[in-house]
Image: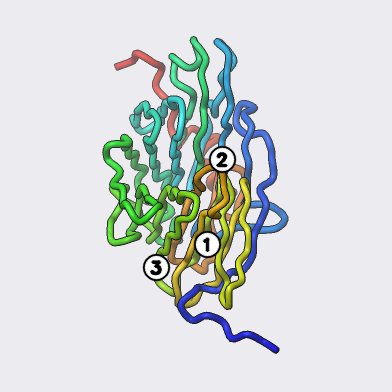
Amino acid sequence: MTTAPDPTLRPLAGVVPAVETLEGGGFRVHRPFPTGRLELLDPFLLLDEMGPTDYRPGEAVGAPDHPHRGFETVTYLLEGEFEHRDSHGGHGVIGPGGVQWMTAGAGVVHSEMPSERIRRHGGRVHGFQIWVNLPAADKMIPPRYQSLTAADLPTVEGDAWRLRLVAGELAGRRGPAATRTPVAVAHLVVEPGGVARLDVPADHNVGLYVFAGGATVPTGAGASTPVGTHELAVWHRAGGGVVVEGPPTADREVEALVLAGAPLGEPVARYGPFVMTTRQELIEAIDDFQAGRMGTIAPTGSA
């Protein structure tokens, strides 16, 4: 006997485990995509969980000067401090709960490093790096940098759950980050026994990356699917809400990153730090970087 799907629930497409790898200057990340299991979650191109890593004095590493073109990079920090510098004059240091949102657009060289305090004295670093694709028509727009503190991010409180919004609209609130592509990015916490329901437009892709604890996702007729730490739940594009439960017997709350967005449905051509729509555009990006047309980062302390 086949049970009819619950029309109030968005159908779950699957659960993808993250792979562990090294990035940047050699820091450890868990990456649910892109991997062999999942190439992208259109319009999201990449999701990396950085750490948590405890550094001793002089050990901390990040991502030294490197270029980007054709998309937006987002850093959301849970613990530690990160410093951003770029070739268009963007600069900022964020702490726990802070966000750096950079639109690479036509091209920028930037660095993202643990702060001088972390590098000198050590400390814990834990956060996320997200890449958001830009539509073909926006890939050559001027670069832009946004820096947000934890106090800038609104929080929605539910019954045994809470949601901190970085960008886009969820649970009736809107995050402060300005985006070129319609996306929502949020930090969800569900207590043991709590149930959070998020309504997302039916034509948007949705993913939930669990980074602490373990959640369950109801799939209808009393059935549910577990989503463990370092796993990404992905839903089909359809009507119905996304429901996340904190198991009543859990010994800690669930923490997860919610990603939702309108798919661009455009060709994706990738090569390292460049994401365009054709191979020829990638060649042009490489040429422009090598010729210095994306600029250089001014030395610290320069005017």
Q: What is the crowding at mark 2: few (fewer than 14 residues within 10 Å), some, or many (at least 20)?
A: many
Classify 110 as above or below 40: above
Question: Which residue is denoted by mark 1 in the rendering?
Answer: 42
Name the image quarter holding residue 216. bottom right
Q: Residue at x 60, y 55 (%)?
A: 232
Classify 152 as above or below 32: above
CB under 8 Å between discs 1 and 3: no
Could you tell which of marks 1 and 3 lies nearer the N-terminus? 1
Question: Which residue is denoted by mark 2 in the rendering?
Answer: 49
Q: Position of residue 122 (x, y in %)?
A: 52, 14
Find the distance from the CA under tag 1 to the CA under tag 2: 18 Å
Question: Which residue is denoted by mark 3 in the rendering?
Answer: 199
Task: State left or right for residue 2 relative to residue 141.
Answer: right
Could you tell which of marks 3 and 2 lies nearer the N-terminus? 2
Q: Position of residue 189 (x, y in %)?
A: 44, 48
Tag 2: amino acid: Glu
Q: What colouring style does the render use?
A: rainbow
Tag 1: amino acid: Asp
Tag 3: amino acid: Asp
Badge nearest the viewer, 1 or 2? 2
Q: Quadrant of the C terminus?
A: top left
Task: Pick the residue in front: 98 or 5.
Answer: 5
Label 3 SS: loop
| Residue ranking furthest to the right | 36
Q: Quadrant of the N terminus?
A: bottom right
Q: Position of residue 143 (x, y in %)?
A: 37, 43
Task: Pick the residue in front: 165 or 84.
Answer: 165
